[in-house]
Amino acid sequence: MDWEAKTEERLVEKLRKIEALHAGATTSGERIAAEGARDRILQRLLELERVEPVVEYQFSMQDEWSKMLFISMLRRYGLKPYRYPRQRRTTVMVRITESFLDEVLWPGFEELNRTLREHLGSVTQRIIRQAIHDGAFDVEERTGG
């Protein structure tokens, strides 16, 4: 297995562990195994929907990568993302309980998004250095105009 495939495999495993953590895994074995995380999250969602009202939320994603991740998470948990006519393509609407959003979905999204962005940034820098120029990415700061 080449370096890139191993790196991707490690990233996928890390993402699974993050999901397990946000699913309420309580033991290190659960966190390491990361199996059943989706089922635990779905169970939590159903429990919250029985005792809390479902509310419509609007999210504005900062880029296409974040939007793809967020929509994928919503669909993974059986939620139906949508947007209204004339809303920006980066807008995602969903109806969920406030507790599920605050306790599970948003913290999980933020951590997964941060992890993916770090990985994408690293890959992008490596490719630019190999294909374009192996130098610094910052620009010189000058005074005046």
Image (spheres, rainbow, N blue to C red):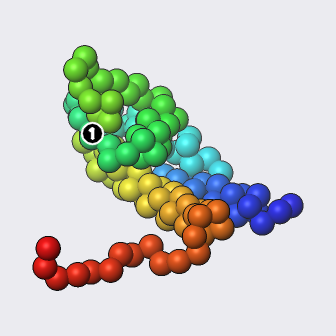
Q: Quadrant of the C terminus?
A: bottom left
Q: Residue furthest right?
A: 1
Figure quadrant of residue 15: bottom right
Say if residue 37 shows up in the picture.
Answer: yes
Figure quadrant of residue 59: top left
Residues 135 and 64: in front is: 135
What kind of residue is marked 1?
A: Phe
Above-or-below relation of 110 to 88: below
Left/right of residue 138 with respect to residue 131 in the rendered view: left
- Residue on which the image places disc 1: 59
Above-or-below relation of 24 to 87: below
Query: Residue 51: x, y in percent?
Result: 27, 34
Left/right of residue 70 with respect to residue 5 in the rendered view: left
Numbered-mark total: 1
Q: Residue at x 55, y 67 (%)?
A: 125
Residues 144 and 17: in front is: 144
Q: Judging from the image, what secondary structure is the residue with disc 1 in?
A: strand
Q: Quadrant of the N terminus?
A: bottom right
Above-or-below relation of 76 to 18: above
Say if residue 13 shows up in the picture.
Answer: no
Q: Residue at x 44, y 61 (%)?
A: 114
Residues 53 and 130: in front is: 130
Query: Residue 55: x, y in percent?
Result: 22, 31
Instruction: Specify few, some or many for label 1: CA neighbours under 10 Å numbering under 14, 14-19, or 20 or more.
Output: few
Query: Residue 50: x, y in percent?
Result: 32, 31
Q: Residue at x 17, y 82 (%)?
A: 143
Figure quadrant of residue 94: top left
Q: Residue furthest front?
A: 145
Left/right of residue 49 with respect to residue 2 in the rendered view: left
Query: Residue 82: x, y in percent?
Result: 34, 24
